Image (tube, rainbow, N blue to C red):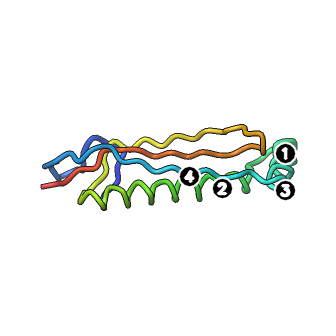
Amino acid sequence: MQITTTDGVPGREVHDSLGVVAGEAILGVNIFRDLFAGITDILGGRSQGYQKALREARDHAMRDMEEEAARLGADAVIGVDIDYEAVDTQKGAMLLVSCNGTAVRLQ
């Protein structure tokens, strides 16, 4: 399945628009990753723990969105938007990644 942030798939025409599809992933942030991220922030550099968590969350959200599009009979998802959010709860911080786009059939 084609997934793109553009409003179409190069070389293909949209035949039918099937509606908006979405996928979400929420990950808890653990104390050890927070601790090492804090040390990395103090020393400078990239926080590998958070990068890995965000990548996994994005991949999960994209898969959910793609599965929803497939259930509708789509060939592609266009206009994809990916959003990242930090959510504070009483139990700690959570990372939210959401993906949405338009499921379409191509000619």
Q: In the figure, 17 relative to 68: above or below?
A: above
Structural distance between the alpha carbons of marks 3 and 2: 13 Å
| The image quarter in which residue 94 lies | top right
Screen quadrant of the C terminus: bottom left
| The image quarter in which residue 8 lies | top left
Q: Secondary structure at mark 1?
A: helix
Structural distance between the alpha carbons of marks 1 and 2: 15 Å
Image point (46%, 46%), residue name: 99
Q: Amino acid at mark 4?
A: Ala
**Callout 3–callout 1 Cβ contact below 8 Å:** no
Q: In the rendered image, which residue does mark 2 sit on?
A: 53
Query: Which of marks 2 and 3 precedes in the sequence?
Result: 3
Query: Which of marks 4 and 3 precedes in the sequence?
Result: 4
Query: Which of marks 2 and 1 precedes in the sequence?
Result: 1
Badge 2 crowding class, 10 Å Cα cut-off, few under 14, some 14 to 19, many 20 or more, is some
Q: Amino acid at mark 3?
A: Phe
Q: Is residue 3 left or right of residue 86?
A: left
Image point (13%, 49%), residue name: 15
Image point (32%, 43%), residue name: 20
- In the rendered image, residue 85, in percent from the top left (x then y), is placed at 61, 38
Image point (67%, 38%), residue name: 87
Q: In the rendered image, which residue does mark 1 sit on?
A: 38
Q: Amino acid at mark 2?
A: Ala
Q: In the rendered image, which residue does mark 4 sit on?
A: 25
- In the rendered image, residue 79, in percent from the top left (x then y), is placed at 33, 42
Q: Amino acid at mark 1?
A: Gly
Q: Which mark is residue 32?
A: 3
